[in-house]
Amino acid sequence: MLGHVNFKHVYLARGTTDLRKSIDGLAAIVTESFSLDPFSSSLFVFCNRKKDKLKILYWEHNGFWLYYRRLERGTFNWPSKDDTSSAMLITPRQLRWLLDGLSLNQKSSHKKVSATIIL
């Protein structure tokens, strides 16, 4: 579903967020807590206390998208809140890992190959 979205950055709200918040409440967190612009072409990802639900806020042209994901079993490997209240910048690849139930800090993965010929 997120494959068609053209975004520049992915920000995680470390720790937990009350997911009863709607678009306006999440946009207020982005503005007031993170000092970021919710109208930028970035994804803002929030997780609940039980780590089984996510909301992703995204602005596109003339309105917000609010993506919601609920796991039927298991939890997301969500980073805990540290000393800073800023959002955590991650790569699109790390977001895919997170959505697949993996850690953001994979120990190894296949290296990118830039092949120019077929052997």
Image (cartoon, rainbow, N blue to C red):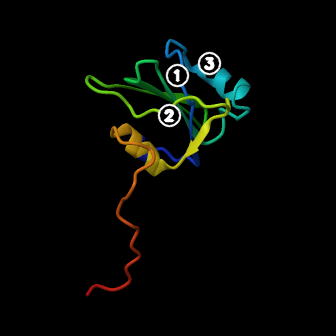
Along the line of sight, the residue nearer the viewer: 96 or 68: 96
Mark whose residue sits in front, 3 or 2? 2
In the rendered image, residue 69, in percent from the top left (x then y), is placed at 38, 27
**Which residue is label 2 attached to?**
79
Residue type marked 1: Thr
Along the line of sight, the residue nearer the viewer: 82 or 27: 82
Of the image marks 3 and 2, the number of the one nearer the N terminus:
3
**Which residue is label 3 attached to?**
24
Circles 3, 2 touching at the beta carbon (< 8 Å): no
Quadrant in which residue 115 is drawn: bottom left
In the rendered image, residue 9, in percent from the top left (x then y), is placed at 58, 46
Would you say 45 lies left or right of 85 here? left
Of the image marks 1 and 3, the number of the one nearer the N terminus:
1
Kindly identify which numbered label has been placed on residue 16: 1
Q: CA distance from mark 1 to mark 2?
A: 9 Å
Q: CA distance from mark 1 to mark 3?
A: 17 Å
Would you say 16 lies left or right of 24 here? left
In the rendered image, residue 14, in percent from the top left (x then y), is placed at 56, 30
Q: What residue is shown at x 61% (from left), y 42% (from top)?
A: 41
Question: Relative to 106, does residue 77 appear above or below in the rendering?
Answer: above
Q: What residue is shown at x 52% (from left), y 30% (from top)?
A: 80
* Quadrant of the image containing the N terminus: top left
Q: Which SS class for mark 2?
A: loop
Q: Within 10 angstroms of label 2, few (less than 14), some, or many (20 or more) residues? A: some
In the rendered image, residue 117, in percent from the top left (x then y), is placed at 33, 86
Circles 1, 3 touching at the beta carbon (< 8 Å): no
Q: Which SS class for mark 3?
A: helix
Q: Which SS class for mark 1?
A: loop
Q: What residue is shown at x 26% (from left), y 22% (from top)?
A: 72
